[in-house]
Amino acid sequence: MQPDHSELMPRLFGLAIEAGAATLRYYGGGDPEVQKKVDGSPVTAADQAAEAVILERLRAWTPDIPIVAEEAVAAGDVPDVSGGRFWLVDPLDGTREFLGGNGEFTVNIALVETGAPVLGIVHAPALGLTYTGIVGRGAQLAEGRAPARPIAARPVPEGGLVVVASRRHGDQDALTGYLEKVHVLAERRIGSSLKFCLLATGEADLYPRFGRTMEWDTAAGDAVLRAAGGRVQTVDGDPLTYGKPGFENPYFVAFGER
C-alpha cells in the first residue's frame, strides 16, 4: 500500500527532531570517540544513536518499505530495493562538520519511488533549522519554534550566480573548470546537505558536485530542492536517479530553478 506523503511528513518532522537531539547529546562535549569505516570515512556514536532512532520508527510505521541507511549498509545490511520504493537515511551528514563544531551537520530522511525522491526532510539540529519537501506539493522551512514557512528556489539572477560548494570534498580543478563557463557572483562553502537547502530557499543558485557522494547523502536535500522548484542532474544532463547498484552517485549539478 502506498503511504500518504502528507500524513507521513508530520511524523517524519518529529522523528528528525528526535534523531537530531540524539546527535546533540554527543556534540560539543569534548573529543567524541571516532571510528573509521571501510571507506576511511569517520563514524561516531552520534551517527549510530541517530540511526537507531530513525530505523526503529520507520520499521514500525512502514514495515513493508525497505530502509537503506548509511551505517547499516556499512555494517553489511543492504536491503533489496528492486520494488522501487524505499527509504534513504543519513543519520548524520557532515560528520567532519560535527567533529569540527561548526554546526553544519544534518539528519536526512527521504522516501524514493521509482528512482526519484518524492519527499525529504533535512534537519540541522545545532542550527535549529528543518527543511521539508513533498515533490509536487512544495517545500517549507521551520526555524526553531517558529511556524514553518514556504520556501522556493529563485529565478536565475541577472547579476550572476551564487554558487555553493563543499568545504572539504571534491575535485577542485573540475569545479574551477565548470565555473569558468558560468557567470559567478559569489561562492559559498558549506558542509552537508545544507547546500541543497540554500538553493531551495533562494539563497544560492548552483551546486556542482565533482566528488564522491552516496545516495543517502543527497536524497533528502534533493527532495527538498525539487519540491522548492529546483532540479538535480548528472553532468551529462540526465536526472539524478536513486536505487543504483552500490548506491553511489555520479558527479552532478543542482540548480535552483527548473
Image: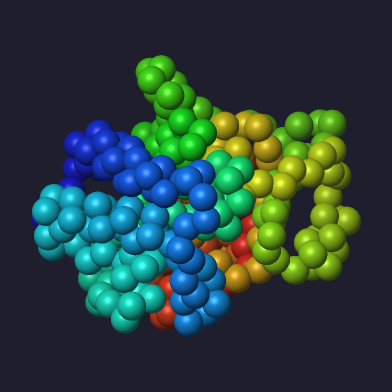
Would you say residue 248 is visible in this rendering? no
Up-down: is 49 above or below 173? above
Q: Position of residue 2 (x, y in %)?
A: 17, 52
Front position in the image: 231 or 63: 63
Would you say residue 59 is visible in this rendering? yes
The structure's colour scheme is: rainbow
Up-down: is 207 above or below 8? below
Q: Residue at x 52, y 56 (%)?
A: 31
Q: Position of residue 85 (x, y in %)?
A: 26, 62
Marks counted in the figure total: 0
- Indicate the quadrant where residue 186 lies: top right
**Quarter occupied by the N terminus:** bottom left
Q: Position of residue 180 (x, y in %)?
A: 88, 56
Front position in the image: 211 or 16: 16
**Quarter occupied by the C terminus:** top right
Looking at the image, the residue that sits furthest to the right is 180
Q: Residue at x 37, y 34 (%)?
A: 137
Q: Residue at x 34, y 61 (%)?
A: 48
Up-down: is 238 above or below 146? below
| Relative side of 127 to 212, left or right | left
Up-down: is 21 above or below 93? above
Looking at the image, the residue that sits furthest to the top is 146
Front position in the image: 128 or 233: 128
Q: Residue at x 55, y 41 (%)?
A: 103
Q: Position of residue 93 (x, y in %)?
A: 49, 55
- Indicate the quadrant where residue 203 lies: top right
